[in-house]
Image (cartoon, rainbow, N blue to C red):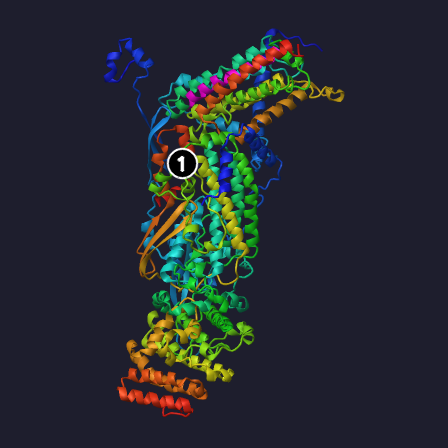
Amino acid sequence: MAIKDPELQHLQDSSAFADEVSEGRLVTEQMLLNVGPQHPATHGVFRLLATIDGERIVRAEPVVGYMHRGYEKLVEQRDYRQITNLISRMDWLSGINNELPLALALEKLMEIEVPPRAQYLRVALAEMNRILNHLMFFQSFAAELGAITPTFYAFREREDIQYAMESVTGGRMHFGFFRPGGLKEDVPKGFIAMALASIRKVIERLPDYEDLLTGNEIFKQRTINIGLLEKEVAYAYGVSGPIGRGSDIDMDVRRDEPYLVYDEFDFDVCTAPHGDCFDRFWVLLHEIIESAKIVEQALEALPPGPILGKVPRVVEAPKGEVYIRTENPLGELGFYLVSDGGKRPYRIKIRTPSFSNVSALPHVLRDTLVADMIAILGSFFFVLGDVDR
Amino acid sequence: MDIDLTAWQILIVKLLIILTVVPVGALIGGYVLHKEMAHMQHRLGPMYAGGWHGWAQTLADGIKFAYKEDIIPASADRRVFSMAPAVIFVPVLLLFLVIPIDRTLIIEDLDVGLFYLLAIGSVGAIGVLMAGWSSANKYALIGALRSAGQLIAYELPIVLSAAAVAMLAGSLSLVTIVEAQDWPFILWPPGIGLALFMLFILGAMAEMSLPPFDMPVAESELITGPFTEYTGMRFIFGFFFAETAHMIAFAGIGTTLFLGGYKPIVPWGPLEVIPGIIWFFVKTAFMIFLLLWIRFSFPRLREDQLQKFAWKFLIPLSLALILATGAWILYGPGG
Amino acid sequence: MALDHVDERLERARKPGFGIGLLKGMLVLLKHLFKRNTVIQYPEVKQDLSPRTRGVIALKEENCTVCMLCARECPDWCIYIDSHKETLPPKRKGGRPRKRNVLDRFAIDYALCMYCGICVEVCPYDALFWSREFEYAEYDIRQLTHEKERLSDWMATVLPPLELEEGAELPGQAKPATATTPAAPAPTQGATAGTPASTSSSAAEARPEQVTEAPKTPTAVPEASKPATAETAAEPAPETAKPTEGLKEATEEQQMDASATTTPEPAAKIDAGGGVAQEGTQAEVEEATAAETPAGPTSSAVTETPVAQPPAPVKPTPRPEDLEAPEAAYTRVVEAQKEAGSSPQVAEARAKVARVKAERALTQARAATPQQAAADPEPSGAAAAGEPEPAQGPVAPAEQDDPVPAQGPVAPTEQDDSVPAETGDEPQGAAEPAAEPQSAEGEQPEAAAEDPEAVYERVLAEERSKGSSDPVATARAKAARMRAIKGTLGPADG
């Protein structure tokens, strides 16, 4: 075997070479493994430059921007209703939660009162979307670990909820339903029953998912104490949402700074102390339960009345700026809306949860195995549209 | 009517039997796989190909693959690349030589049938290494190395559990082993039988790279591991056919060793009228169902966890079971 | 706040299970193996989609007036419209030749369309509809541009809109009975009108909220939604809200709904105020007037309100002090109109209308409760000059036509009433003497009811605003006070 490294050439002819090997001082090179941007395990066009030493990742650097569509520039050229339809494509798994901060920001600037029926329906739809999102990540995490069955179960539950949302909004993924002041139109007859039935079905089947995954020893072996994200590090990177709560950050905008009518509902915020993949998954599953609780309370207590407040025909935000934080299923979504008093915003700065979440990846991926990288990427719930906007 | 055939003719007939039965069996096995997976996942599976519930799906898949372009990467080692699927597939075919379908229905009743099985079964590992190495692909290489390590590690539980069975039966000939089994099959010797069966199942699943031991072919990471660069017929023969035929073979072996082969489940009068073939197929079908069931349920083990599981748990357990079997034979009621 | 029981389960879940969990997982799959399958085998079986499903957009050509709103609002610019103008002969002899827009080309490029539905939403003439058909995939992308004919063909697949869920409000069908309860919190806003927190938003409130195609009075104010905490302090107040407020809400609602349905027909809404009625502002005036007409709309132009009559008899007539003072109404409307950017003439006209209505309401209220008249203070602007907060307490809610801007108009208008000079509006100042005889007229039957002191203050303020010197102002104020005590008529009255 020829030794290519010039520094070690002197070993070529000597038996000391064998000693070097046996003493474990043989120099090895680190390999640069490019994960993505096309890769089944990453949630989209996400590139990870991993420097690996054997099976161990020495350093991992995420490269984002492959999906940058220039949202913050696009919205400068569109009026608010067009933005509502555009912005739900940012984090496409939680479509309606993207429209929410925009509507809230406009309501705050224009000082519009939203009727309670609209508030309750907004909460119901937003939480249903949260369940959709969480089911999606539940199945994607399982699929990346090799469990192919949860995918189909999750999509079956999603189907019922999406059908209910389609009967209201007309869309299954991109809704374009929230308007400043309320909703576009009221819900059709039978929606409440349909939505409640679909939510209850999800809750009914949740123990199945727990059996299938969280109770599974193989799953536990792959996720417990893997991908540790310490609380301080999570704070430093601004990690929020189920990932943050899985690292014991007790923060939920719905409870801390209630918007809409969240302060009227009884729900818990689930956190988990360990900060590993299992905990993040655990938080994800339990958030489904909490969201279902909220949907039930909202739809059962739905007050009668109008679903749109008094809004001018042409939505023009007055001059001013406002920052609205909401709890996107993936974390804290913030819209900083600067208006110069026109039909179009002057600037909207979007603070997306996935961007901050992804920025914690290099820390988490240090000194992990390549196979664990997949599990960690799976347990980090991010959507590329949200990261790159 | 007695048909007098020369030895050569008999050989050709036997080869033809294998060469027809095995691929057909693989097709049926593939169909069962699709359907079982689908229904367990609350969906329907193939419904169109062939009209009635998609029975011809795997046949259509096979024909489709025949149309595919045969691509060999430029920097690949052509000869090794071409030979690797054969090295994987032929041993699988050869496995069927010694499996007894009925008392007298066996292609070749070797006296060392079990030994032959285990030996032939290990040749596949070389094929996997050949495939991965010659592909000139980093991911394929990683997959091949993982696979080789896994195959070697999980040979031992299979071999040791089979050895224990041979000890209990007192012979390596498969027909004798079947004859030596009595109802209840895997429950005897108590505890040991079941444990040996579990060992065999786990080892077989790992040998075939089925989940939860499919790290080498972890689709979400390495696409298809050592077979990433393979297309068309090479892929079908080296990967899909091999896997399905292998599964049927192992199901057959498992039936033979643990479930009583062609014997009726319960030695009850009316049941014994049913020919042994039927029993064999029923039991093999059950084995296939079991293997697939486990396959769909679990996420995959990480490579090092897989190895740990084999070396630190399964192999010591199988060694212990060998001791226990020996003790049973010497001091237990089996005699 | 992590719950303990969750933690417990988490810790238990994290413990190794020695294979039992694996078996449980396998059992789940077995269970599903035997469950009935719910797969819809497309394309033999199709899912029953909702009528609202955004499948394809259909065009009803005869409704299209080529206003180009859809093409303008489309975020993708995928609607291509061509038209030309035609001149038609006059309808009758000597008439003007009519011009008409003729639609030449109306195409939607579905390769670009993002299926947002803005075009369907903005079309004022209901020419575009959603259909749930989605199977129009083509091999050639150019075929995905559907022209007029194809779009009209899609109309055959358009389904009628769905019946709405219980509790939904259809345009023109307010449910005031149910609205009373949620309307209860509304007065609290008025109660907090005086608080500083709301005054900050008052300026914003004064801005008119024009009515959109589906405006509904927020009968129940979603206090929780507003970040401002002023309202939260008023939360307990709902219990003590007077029923009259509910009626007010109801009538406003009726007015609102009435105006709501007439968005495409501005002509019907022109009131005595004159001037060009923009759809929105007209409705706003309606709200303004509605506040003062608890017995029902007095505006003849509003014809849709009969729908909302039933609740009226149930409610008691509001007491005079609960109603908005005419002057206050005037100034409020003027301010609102100014903010909306109406021309001064329009603003003045509408304000006059509002004042007239307020006076009529006062008259009726006083006529209904003569015995209370003596005891109650006159809820006029004069009272405002005195103590805005206590006197205006009951009045303030009355002034809120829409709970949202409720706080707003009260504060500035009060100030306006007390210091009219600040507004410095010529039309307003000029209108005031004109307003005075009317208000005096209105006061006539209830002269005894008005507090003489309040009269004094009011007249004093008015004189000062007109620029009269001090002795003149005090003299006139004293005279007015005497007249109020004696119940005689003055030079301005009659």
Residue A128 point in image, percent of width and height: 49, 49
The magenta segment: B143-168
Left or right position of C157 against B189 = left
Residue A83, located in which quarter of the rendered image?
bottom left
Residue A106, located in which quarter of the rendered image?
bottom left
Residue A249 point in image, percent of width and height: 40, 43
Front one among C186 and C359: C186
Residue C22's place in the image compared with B317, above or below, is below
Residue under circle 1?
A42
Residue drawn where x is 39% and y is 28% of the image: A370
Q: Which chain carries label 1?
A: A
Q: Is residue A323 visible?
A: yes
Residue C83's place in the image compared with A222, above or below, is below
Front one among A268 and C248: A268
Left or right position of A143 against A3 = right
Label 1: how many Cα within 10 Å (few below 14, some 14–19, many 20+): many
Q: How many marks?
A: 1
Left or right position of C190 against B165 = left
Residue drawn where x is 42% and y is 20% of the image: B145
Secondary structure predominantly adopted by residues drawn in magenta: helix
Q: Identify the secondary structure beneath mark 1.
A: loop
Residue A103 point in image, percent of width and height: 40, 56
Front one among B89 and A108: A108
Q: Tell me if residue C127 is in the magenta stretch.
A: no
- Looking at the picture, which amino acid does disc 1 mark? Thr
| Quadrant position of the N terminus of chain C in the picture | top left
Residue drawn where x is 45% and y is 32% of the image: A224
